[in-house]
Image (cartoon, grey):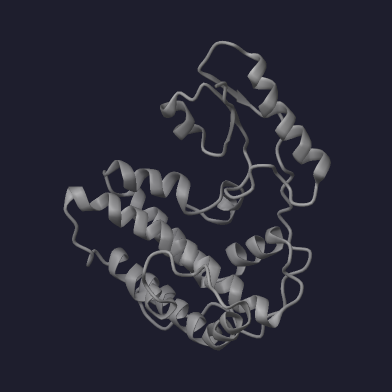
């Protein structure tokens, strides 16, 4: 049976030697591009299906268009939590982690209300509760998570899921207080620009890149921060 696919991570597809694949340079979770743009999405699907006309592979083609990035925030979600940076520790990493804990504590009641309304949560991938995420990431950044080589794959995966849990926690908490974040792009821009959680995830990214393990390199390079948000971070 002839198959074709849409790829979000080019490096993975190169290693898999997929028979036919279309690589798109869109953020993770958005394989068809901008939400609500039916014409653009149809063009992506048609391009992927057109690869079925090719009878020899492996084939990896690049979609010729990108989603336009708006680097200015036109309107940020209303949120009464104060995300102003403050310094309470001479160690900048400890300061960020303390601020992350404060942010999580401030939004915990909203998160609880959201869970009551939704009857579910997506902030439960890594098995660490929202109130423990800061501590878990702190242990990694301070080299307190000792791991053997065979366990590092699990650790890298758990760090990725912890980052996803953080984003889900913020989204669900904020959705209880704000009606203007229905567009995932608006939330993504707000999260990566405003929160200490984003800064901590970036520190995890840098720490992972400092390690030699291949899974940590993959984690730091591709799996923590969307490519279209990387310009917000230096180093």
- Between 154 and 191, which is closer to the camera in this rendering? 154
User: What residue is rendered at 70% in x and 44% in y?
Assistant: 33
71 relative to 62, above or below: below
With 131 as the anchor, is 68 left or right in this view? right
User: What residue is rendered at 57% in x and 25% in y?
Assistant: 3
- Between 74 and 159, which is closer to the camera in this rendering? 159
Among all residues in the image, which is located at the extreme top?
56
Among all residues in the image, which is located at the extreme right?
39
| Residue 17 position within the rendered picture, expressed as x and y whole percent measured from the top left | 45, 23
- Between 95 and 208, which is closer to the camera in this rendering? 208
216 relative to 92, above or below: above
The quadrant of the picture occupied by the N terminus is: top right
170 relative to 150, above or below: below
With 161 as the anchor, is 60 left or right in this view? right
189 relative to 39, above or below: below
| Residue 216 position within the rendered picture, expressed as x and y whole percent measured from the top left | 33, 48
Among all residues in the image, which is located at the extreme left?
148
User: What residue is rendered at 71% in x and 54% in y?
Assistant: 71
| Residue 119 position within the rendered picture, expressed as x and y whole percent measured from the top left | 57, 78
User: What residue is rendered at 51% in x and 38% in y?
Assistant: 9
With 160 as the anchor, is 184 left or right in this view? right
Q: How many labels were placed on the picture? A: 0
């Amino acid at each position: 049976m002839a198959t074709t696919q849409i790829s979000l991570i080019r490096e993975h597809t190169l290693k898999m030697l997929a028979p036919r694949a279309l690589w798109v340079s869109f953020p993770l979770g958005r394989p068809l591009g901008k939400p609500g743009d039916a014409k653009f999405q149809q063009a992506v699907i048609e391009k992927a299906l057109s690869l079925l006309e090719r009878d020899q592979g492996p084939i990896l083609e690049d979609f010729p268009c990108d989603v336009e990035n708006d680097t200015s925030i036109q309107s940020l979600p209303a949120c009464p939590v104060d995300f102003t940076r403050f310094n309470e520790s001479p160690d900048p990493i400890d300061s960020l982690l303390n601020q992350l804990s404060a942010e999580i504590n401030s939004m915990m009641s909203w998160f609880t209300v959201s869970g009551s309304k939704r009857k579910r949560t997506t902030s439960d991938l890594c098995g660490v509760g929202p109130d423990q995420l800061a501590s878990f990431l702190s242990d990694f950044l301070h080299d307190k998570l000792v791991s053997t080589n065979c366990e590092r794959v699990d650790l890298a995966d758990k760090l990725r899921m912890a980052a996803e849990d953080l984003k889900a926690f913020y989204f669900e908490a904020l959705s209880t207080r704000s009606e203007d974040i229905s567009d995932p792009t608006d939330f993504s821009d707000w999260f990566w620009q405003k929160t200490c959680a984003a800064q901590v995830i970036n520190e995890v990214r840098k720490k992972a890149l400092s390690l030699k393990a291949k899974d940590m390199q993959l984690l730091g390079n591709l799996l923590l921060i969307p490519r279209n948000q990387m310009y917000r971070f230096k180093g």
